[in-house]
Image (cartoon, grey):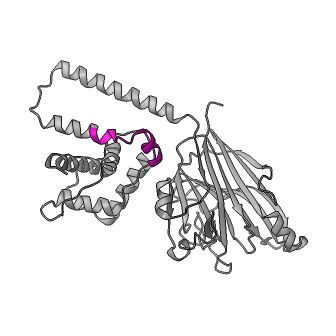
Amino acid sequence: MNDLDASAFAALFREACRKCFGHPVKSLLSETESKLFSGKIFEQTGLVIGAKSIKNYSNYVFHSADGKEKNPSVATLDTLARYVLNSPYTDEIKRKANESHYPYWFQYKDQFYRSLKKPVKKTKWMLVVIIFSAITIALVAILFRHKDKIPESFTENFQSVREDSLLHRGWFVQSKDTGYWNKRKSKPGHLGLFTLRGDNWPDSGEAPGIKNLLVRKISSDCFTAEVHLTEFIPKQNWQQAGILLMEDTVFSGKTVRLSLMYNDFSGGAPVSREILIQAITSLGKNYDKPEEIANQPVLYLDSARQNITVINLQNSALKIEKQGKRFRFLYAYGQMENSAFKELASRELDMKPQYIGLFALKGFVDNADDIPVYFKFFRLTDNSCSK
């Protein structure tokens, strides 16, 4: 990196820090600040710069006398520029397909080089140029956003569950339990998660949290999400797996969950062991009681032979459709992979999910086993909200 490019990078990094933290930053970023910075870049741009890299860049920019020279890739520089310039949301696949020339970094660098030339007096003509440029940028942004609303579909077959590969495809793992996360490759062509202790709402003083929650950003207000499971047969309370919609990734906002689960809790009535589909919502960190939207038993274990249970749950699927405020919950199961979906419930909810997660959990209990859940297929389709 030549001296001019290094100066442009330093200016860009300082400007990005100012945008992230709301004030000029003049000292080395902490690990926590670096993680926050990395998260904000991903949330706005859809692209990733690791927290460790950000901390190293801050050491170079703010302590250049001590920090070793850094040579960030052009892709990293473009991501920083996209963050500062408020570019449209994207991901690595779209950028490689449509913007592999990294236009935002070169746009920022060109602006930086021009700023080094002798200043021009602020005249009415310059004001007109600035206003015209702002209008042009706004129109381009509107056009890009309109383009992004064209229905798109992301499909995941989990042929590779290497962490870097998942990250490249827009996934990130939250609350990692390294021991169990390392077992995610145990069934070829699947993502293996385990029903670990945790939940997405507080219970008896427990902080909300789901280990090895696999998350991706939702880019549309109207969408269809679908997931397929292979041979998941929960046998103890509250073993379950499925789809989680979230307003944020720390469970402070609203969540909606659709899961295949086990239940033998009957509140004093005769115990009945059953596997059911449940849709449930939580209003956020200040509400400790969730609301059950619907549940539908699919198998009564006391009246079913074990081999029938295995056959019926050889393949299962869950689907959530969101159209405006209307949420529709569907499920399917059977020996065949193409079993038809059935509607569980339809409900209007005042919620705008920003993230979707694939999860396995057993609630805050210790007397249930950590059993594997194999996710075979996932699809997220953007829908038009004009229907």
Q: Is residue 50 rendered to the left or right of residue 200?
A: left
Identity of the residue drawn at 53% across and 69% down: 207
Q: State the residue in front, 234 or 282.
A: 234
Where 385 falls versus 55 (above or below)? Answer: above
Q: State the residue in front, 323 or 77.
A: 77
Q: Is residue 281 rendered to the left or right of residue 118?
A: right
Q: State the residue in front, 237 or 54.
A: 54
Where 41 falls versus 136 (above or below)? Answer: below
Q: Quadrant of residue 67?
A: bottom left
- Residue 100 in the magenta stretch? The answer is yes
Q: Quadrant of the C terminus?
A: top right
Where 131 falls versus 217 (above or below)? Answer: above
Q: Is residue 372 rendered to the left or right of residue 121?
A: right
Q: Residue furthest right?
A: 303
Identity of the residue drawn at 35% across and 45% down: 83
Q: Is residue 197 in view from this perspective?
A: yes
Where 94 falls versus 313 (above or below)? Answer: above
Q: Is residue 29 in view from this perspective?
A: no
Q: Residue furthest left?
A: 118
Q: Quadrant of residue 327?
A: top right
- All told, the count of numbered labels is 0
Where residue 228 appears, as percent x and y from the top left, is 69, 57
Q: Residue furthest bottom?
A: 367
Q: State the residue in front, 70 or 83.
A: 70
Q: What span is in magenta?
A: 88-106
- Residue 211 in the magenta stretch? The answer is no
Q: Quadrant of residue 268?
A: bottom right
Where residue 165 appears, as percent x and y from the top left, is 49, 59
Where residue 288 appears, as percent x and y from the top left, is 60, 63
Where residue 257 appears, as percent x and y from the top left, is 65, 57
Identity of the residue drawn at 22% across and 36% down: 111
